[in-house]
């Protein structure tokens, strides 16, 4: 049994499929004599592109760290420039009439074999460099994220060192029963995506990708964060019973769908859904969501060669607006960078992507892309109740600049006679410590707030969201996070703004008391968690929750907050959490 971090609930078992190295299916097909020249040109183009990527990364490193750190990149550039390397591949294209990817793979295999035969350990090590350079060229040749699952016929449990959010988006329930990875944490976008797709997942297992072979029978329990290798019949029986139990619980909870999320003393708090793509709206409504509190639009942008057009985006946003009606949907402008990239080219790379060109910063640089999205959102706002919000705002200038571009876009639409909601509400995501501190200033220039505790924890506690080594420090009940939420709500309410909380913490029923007590107006979460959250809220009293929340603000550690919440949940409301 291996213990990791359960990030997407559910129990599944089946055969494993281990993805190793660059998770890439390499297409192999013959070409006609007329295609040879074009295929060679394609290879050269990919090589040139790889070289300029390496040169630009290297220049970046020199600027930030000094010359001595570019050694590996320089080695890679030398390999690329080695005439025999590219020549072997181009010859294979013309000699065997095969596509560039196949020819490159053959050339790589040849070179790797030569390295393997050398006795010198240092030279042997260089084999990795050749593989990495080859992987880069292949990636550029393919021009887009590869289809991870092309090779698998029956549904499998995927095992990998890591899956990017873009990889995860390619997973479908028909092909993937669940997945387990070496690295990752509960608030990485990969984990969020797994929950959205309702695929059970365990991450942060350290070396599972080395311990398992394709075809091994494994079981994963996404609730407990457990992976069992070769489970015995007894173990399987135990988990079958657990699966049935979970399903019955879910059915019971669904009966709550039409009941209001109202406390015993009559306080209502809106429970909305976080979604990643339009199809999820249906599930969200089934679980009783009263609207969409966060639509993460970046999934329209990744895993593709070209940017989504304004028209394509408009169709998507309009669909959401119409589906959730009479409720509202909050569309967040695209939050690329950090752990979500356009592919290719990788965006927001560098040494510390979370602190780099991400979210609103990226949009304010790529004005054409930003405006196309704003036009699409504005146009869609005519067809339902939409709201708009900007991610990762850290200062008032950013908010002003974004609003200015929005106003310009609206003016253009008006000029062309295209209808839109002229009273579209504009919100700010509070997810940097800076935004917390200046929440009063931001409140003067926005219509609502949405607190993103995933990023707020990342930046306040200085822990990388995707790094399993520091995942133990991630704690949304940390006093600094609770105090931040408290002060943001106060700043908002002082100016009559409503506040939503859309980080992952809003889906944990133990947090219901404190979030209600801190007087959030709305909680937005993965739809799966709405029924249970509603059930808990309906057994609380607002006055009691306020007293509890006030007390927790004086407690020194997250662990003490958690214990106190459990104790009060039981003492005041008869609720048991373990
Ligand atoms: C957050 O940061 O809490 C949030 C909701 O946004 P995302 O998880 O997409 O960064
Ligand atoms: Mg965020």
Image: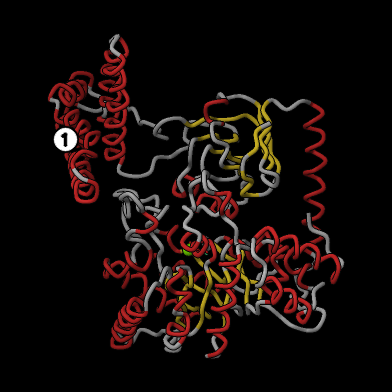
Q: Is residue 393 left or right of residue 469?
A: left
Q: Secondary structure at mark 1?
A: helix
Q: Which residue is mark 1?
A: 44
Residue 282 visible? The answer is no
Nearer the observer, 50 or 461: 461
Locate residue 302, reporting x and y percent.
39, 54
- Answer above or below: position of 236 versus 242: above
Assign the C terminus to one quadrant of the image. Answer: bottom right
Measuring 68% from the left and 31% from the top, which residue is drawn there? 1
Q: Quadrant of residue 373?
A: bottom left
Locate residue 336, reporting x and y percent.
38, 59
Measuring 64% from the left and 46% from the top, which residue is drawn there? 6
Locate residue 359, reporting x and y percent.
38, 64
Crowd class of label 1 (few under 14; some 14 to 19; many from 20; radius 10 Å): some
Measuring 18% from the left and 31% from the top, which residue is drawn there? 80
Locate residue 444, reporting x and y percent.
44, 88
Q: Is residue 548 left or right of residue 130?
A: right
Q: Is residue 229 left or right of residue 307?
A: right
Residue 405 visible? The answer is yes
Q: How many marks?
A: 1
Measuring 85% from the left and 71% from the top, which residue is drawn there? 572
Nearer the observer, 462 or 157: 462
């Amino acid at each position: 049994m291996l213990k990791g971090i359960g990030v997407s609930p559910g129990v599944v078992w089946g055969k494993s499929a281990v993805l190793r190295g660059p998770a890439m299916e390499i297409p192999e097909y013959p070409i006609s004599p007329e295609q040879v020249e074009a295929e060679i040109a394609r290879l050269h183009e990919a090589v040139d592109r790889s070289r300029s990527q390496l040169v630009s990364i290297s220049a970046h490193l020199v600027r930030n760290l000094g010359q001595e750190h570019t050694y590996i990149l320089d080695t890679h550039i030398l390999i690329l420039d080695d005439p025999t390397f590219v020549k072997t591949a181009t010859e294979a294209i013309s000699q065997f009439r095969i596509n560039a990817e196949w020819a490159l793979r053959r050339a790589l295999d040849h070179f790797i074999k030569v390295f393997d035969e050398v006795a010198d350990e240092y030279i042997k090590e260089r084999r990795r460099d050749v593989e990495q350079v080859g992987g880069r060229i292949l990636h550029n040749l393919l021009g887009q994220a590869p289809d991870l699952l092309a090779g698998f016929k029956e549904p499998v449990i995927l095992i990998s060192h890591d899956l990017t959010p873009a990889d995860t988006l390619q997973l479908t329930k028909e092909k993937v029963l669940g997945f387990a990875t070496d690295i990752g944490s509960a608030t990485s976008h990969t984990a969020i995506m797994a929950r959205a797709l309702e695929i059970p997942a365990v991450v942060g297992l350290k070396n599972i990708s080395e311990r398992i072979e394709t075809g091994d029978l494994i079981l994963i329990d996404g609730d407990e964060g457990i992976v069992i290798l070769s489970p015995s019949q007894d173990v399987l029986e135990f988990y079958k019973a657990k699966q049935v139990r979970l399903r019955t619980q879910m059915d019971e909870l669904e009966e709550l769908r039409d009941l209001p999320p109202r406390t015993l003393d009559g306080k209502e708090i809106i429970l909305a859904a976080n979604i990643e793509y339009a199809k999820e709206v249906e599930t969200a409504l089934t679980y009783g969501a009263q609207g969409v509190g966060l639509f993460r639009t970046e999934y329209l942008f990744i895993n593709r060669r070209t940017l989504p057009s304004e028209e394509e985006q408009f169709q998507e946003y309009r669909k959401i607006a119409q589906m959730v009606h009479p409720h509202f949907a909050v569309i967040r402008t695209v939050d690329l960078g950090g752990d979500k990239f356009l592919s290719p080219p990788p965006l927001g790379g560098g040494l510390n992507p979370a602190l780099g060109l991400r979210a609103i910063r990226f949009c304010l640089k790529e004005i054409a892309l930003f405006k196309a999205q704003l036009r699409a959102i504005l146009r869609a706002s005519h067809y339902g109740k939409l709201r708009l919000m900007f991610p990762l705002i850290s200062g008032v200038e950013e908010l002003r600049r974004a609003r200015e571009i929005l106003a310009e876009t609206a003016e253009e639409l008006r000029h062309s006679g295209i209808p839109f909601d002229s009273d579209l509400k504009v919100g700010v995501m509070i997810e940097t410590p800076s935004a917390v501190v200046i929440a009063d200033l931001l409140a003067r220039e926005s219509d609502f707030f949405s607190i993103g505790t995933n990023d707020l924890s990342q930046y306040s506690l200085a822990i990388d969201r995707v790094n399993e080594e520091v995942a133990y420090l991630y704690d949304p009940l940390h006093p600094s996070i609770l105090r931040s939420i408290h002060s943001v709500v106060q700043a908002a309410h002082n100016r009559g703004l409503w506040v939503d909380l859309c980080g992952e913490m809003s889906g944990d029923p133990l947090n219901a008391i404190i979030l209600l007590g801190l007087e959030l107006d709305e909680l937005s979460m993965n739809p799966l968690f709405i029924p249970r959250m509603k059930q808990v809220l309906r057994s609380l009293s607002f006055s009691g929750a306020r007293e509890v929340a006030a007390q927790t603000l004086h407690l020194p550690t997250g662990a003490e907050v958690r214990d106190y919440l459990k104790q009060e949940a039981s003492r005041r409301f008869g609720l048991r959490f373990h």
